[in-house]
Amino acid sequence: MTDFYAVVGNPIGHSKSPAIHTAFAEQTGQDLKYEALLFELDLFAEQARAFFEAGGRGLNVTVPFKLDAWQFAEILSKRAKRAGSVNTLMIGKDKKIYGDNTDGVGLVRDILQNHGGVIEGKRVLVLGAGGAVRGVLEMILAEKPQTLVIANRTVSKAQALVDEFTGLGSVTAVGFEELSSQFDLVINGTAASLQGDLPPLPTGILADGAWCYDMMYGADETPFNAWAREQGAARMMDGLGMLVEQAAESFFIWRHVRPGTEAVISSLRAQLKRT
Ligand code: ATR
């Protein structure tokens, strides 16, 4: 029997998840159908319940419902608890709804495996302190960076994350204007790129050979990656690989089969360039 999965969000028309999961299913011979569903704002729980009652097996959850999904799940994975948000839901054999968050794994796998990067022992700067950053901090810290600094416009939000994650490694919070030391890896998790904007970064914060990662992606270089190039970064990466890797981890949770990601990333990149 064909199993049914979907990605839900609002808006959702732009989602690449159906193409990614359909490619994974073809590649691994899994019998499943995966669609994008527009959920009404304020009706997440009702619509998610209806999806599972109708026999749906799993959901990916995107903006603005990741917190609703966290509340909706009956059983949360350890990493989802810590992330404070859920991007993957599934119904178990016991009919309970399980929630997980695969964003952090997706980011770290993209940096380490697809780009051959290293986080261990590095001085890491994370820009932003919203839901996107909270979702990936545990997995970055699990790689044991030498230090992790969180810079945010609203410093109190960065400090709240520090208070929450400090047991997992050396984490500190600063405002952008206080940034002075140098970093080996800078990860942009602010929503600034969405508005074609750049966080107010001082010059001279990239160490020799520094790598920069924008969790956003687009057809063109993001404003943050353009800044990184001008500042002499050794490598600029964007979030397309993270998108595919978080999807691969969801697919693995649902199907217990790990799909290859390289060809899917290349084909999405080629599509983006054509748009
Ligand atoms: P998300 O789920 O994408 O993380 P969010 O929780 O609203 O969304 O968080 C957005 C993040 O981007 C915040 O860190 C925000 O900074 P503030 O906490 O100070 O609001 C940051 N952000 C958004 N636009 C920005 C801009 N133009 N420059 C710098 N930071 C920006």
Image (cartoon, rainbow, N blue to C red):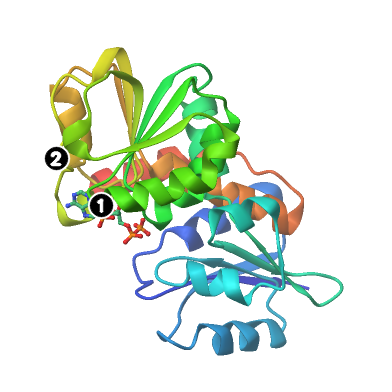
Q: Quadrant of residue 62?
A: bottom left
Amino acid type of the residue tagged 1 in the rendering: Thr
Q: Residue furthest top?
A: 208
Q: Where residue 171 appears, x then y in whole percent?
A: 46, 33
Which residue carries the number 2 mark?
A: 200
Ligand 1 closer than 8 Å to label 2 CB: yes
Q: Nearer the viewer, residue 205 or 171?
A: 171
Q: Is residue 259 left or right of residue 170?
A: right
Question: Looking at the image, is mark 1 or mark 2 nearer the viewer?
Answer: 1
Amino acid type of the residue tagged 2 in the rendering: Pro
| Quadrant the N terminus occupies | bottom right
Which residue carries the number 1 mark?
A: 154
State how far apart marks 1 and 2 are (Cα).
Answer: 12 Å
Q: Is residue 203 above or below residue 138?
A: above
Residue depicted at 25% across the width and 43% down the height: 273
Q: Is residue 101 above or below residue 104?
A: below
Q: Are marks 1 and 2 in contact (CB under 8 Å)?
A: no
Q: Residues within 10 Å of mark 2 (few under 14, many from 20)?
A: few
